[in-house]
Amino acid sequence: MHTVAARAVAATPSTCGLPRIAVCITARSSFIHSLTHAPLSRAHPRQRRQVRVCSRSYASASSASPSSPAVSLSSSALGWLRRLISNWNLTTLATCTRTSSSDPTTNIAKLSSPITTTKMDVDKVSFYPLLLDIITDISEAHFVAIDLELSGVPSKGSWGKDSGKPTIQQRYLEIKEAAERYQILQIGITCVDQNVHDGKYTLKPYNFDLSPVISERGLDVERIFSFQSGAAEFLLGVNFDIGRPFTMGVPYLSRAEAKVAREKFAMRQDKTSMADIHIKPTETESLAFLERVRGEINAWVKSRNMDTPAYLNIAPVGYDTVKDGQRQAEELSRFEKRLVHQLVRAEFPELVTVSKKGFIQIVRFNKEREDRIAADRRRELEERIGRQKGFRWIIEALHGSNISNLDLRECAKDSVTGEPIFADMDDYKAQFNRAQGILRGNPKVIVGHNCFLDMVYIYRTFIGELPDTVEEFQRALHKLWPVVVDTKYMTTHNCGDISPISSLEQIAEQLSAQTTPILDTDKQHTKYNTMDAFHEAGFDSFLTAQVAVRLSAKLEREGTYIDVEDRRNSAAPTDITNGVANMKLTGNALFELQKEQKANGNVDASEAGGFTPSVPGAQWKRVGDPTLEPTSKDDLFEYDPTDLKHRFTKQDLTIPGGMPRFGSDFWRVYGNKFRVFGTQEGVCALDDSIESPIASDEDGGVEV
């Protein structure tokens, strides 16, 4: 073990208004070497970044002053160092407050309690700081389980008074009406990582409160939603904080809302699309105002005085007068401002109006300036849309859309305070590009329990308007997620006409006695290991993930399913070369194989067009030479994580005795089917004839 001591020096103000603490770190050189060179392959990406930042800071300070290296750390960075030391099982980190200018080392307070961190409960402050790690967890997940808490659900019997059970279409219309009226208050996801090497599944649950409030100004998007009294009573009964989504909820913006925001922005910028105000002859005050403005503009345009400013301010009469030592507070009304805009647009095309607080400023038209202003406004709009997009970044990641326009600067913030932090942006980009390369064009398998209603709400909340028929919805949903699993259907498969008891809690309790497959919870997601939080979306998704793993393994193990394809392919190969065709050869074996290929003329086209001289003694060919053949499609220098031609293909591996392989006949029986009790059909099946799309719309989502 190593002891790291810190003594405070004078606190200096920071740009964010909070004090920055200058910390002197004393440690053995071997400790610093371990921070810099220790194997970090098993550490979380964020922990690796913290180790590198701290070690680099210390190394820089040590080279400047070997005797007493001082590293200036913000309060958030100090927290990083404390957690780092706790994770490395070091003894203590001492912090102190300078009480005397004569002795800066006095009053050193030791921290004896271990520091624990959790990333499970995500709010509007911690969302963007954790988003990069969440996207990484999604990219590495074998599947993702989901669950929702809602402000209202469909009312029973709303399809009419007809006797008998409703059809799937009637039930869908009932849910569609509710999804258009009520709000998702909380959403939980659990990323399940299949570790084939260790033979276990690692669960990483997250819990998000979702805010219906659009906090970003200037988007011009409104939402209308309501609460159902029965749903509110139920949520209050399980101690759900109904006010928390409004105060701390994560924002979101659906694709349809983003499209509306862009359309309204374009209309505001296109001044020719504005309807003119028609002034009647009897409106003498308005006519007099227009005449005054017209006269001021003509006088300013015709002026040849050298002192004439490059702009003209149209303000109320007496705007610049001062009375009792104070400027008059009178301003142009919105109606008067609109009249000025209309007048200049109609009679002075060489001029441009700029709206200011209380008045209108008129300047001469300059195309370069106007193009720059328009580009800046467009960029500001996209930044506002990106911030408001919020949870939809996760939805886009789940179905493999293009998320390359995520501003990683938003992620470089403290997850507790929301303050900007020092960050290695190259490390951020590397982690993001890796996750995006895995996700792009590879929608995740979505698992839910009794999730037909959940998927309708998710589509309405994050995608857009719901189709009118259940068949159209089935096709649209299947385009987004080719594989969706309903654990309620798995539990009640071939159950007959009588609906069995199949609540999530009961199923999870019955399956909890199974010792295989092995389920593990990530160390930073251990909240639910010591407590049950039924009807908290994160906890219910956690249970759903457990049920999906254990139940699918149980059904296959008990012989409910026979994998015909796997049994057919299990026979030994007739030719021994088939068994080693995919092996990587090295050393002499590779050299001999290459010689044999060249002798037989079997050289790959990408290799034949390689780096070879044209004639002896001539210069080597260079990139761009028309005589060079195209490079291989797998050339690393041609890799682009946003290009679908480089789509990631996951290895088709399974854990012995674990979940059946996705794509096997098992999931053709149990996958893509929703259990819908109380309907004539009882089951809603997705259309397997539709292939997953790869096209992207303007907002980074897959076209629907």
Image (cartoon, rainbow, N blue to C red):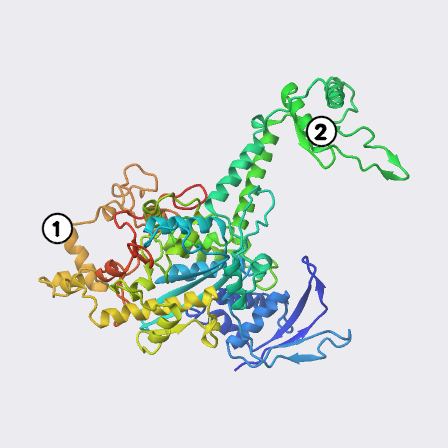
Name which quarter of the figure residue 681 lies in.
bottom left
Residue labelled with disc 2 = 336
Disc 1 and disc 2 in contact, CB within 8 angstroms: no
Name which quarter of the figure residue 43 lies in.
bottom left
Residue labelled with disc 1 = 600
Q: Earlier in the sequence, mark 1 or mark 2?
A: 2
Q: Position of residue 390 (x, y in %)?
A: 51, 53
Q: Position of residue 565 (x, y in %)?
A: 17, 61
Residue 381 lies left or right of residue 564; in this view the side is right
Q: Position of residue 665 (x, y in %)?
A: 21, 60
Q: Quadrant of the C terminus?
A: top left
Q: Residue at x 54, y 75 (%)?
A: 85
Q: Residue furthest right?
A: 324
Name which quarter of the figure residue 222 lies in.
top right
Residue 499, numbered label: none
Distance CA(mark 1)–CA(mark 2): 86 Å
> Which amino acid, mark 2?
Glu
As helix, strand or loop, the secondary structure at mark 2 comes to helix
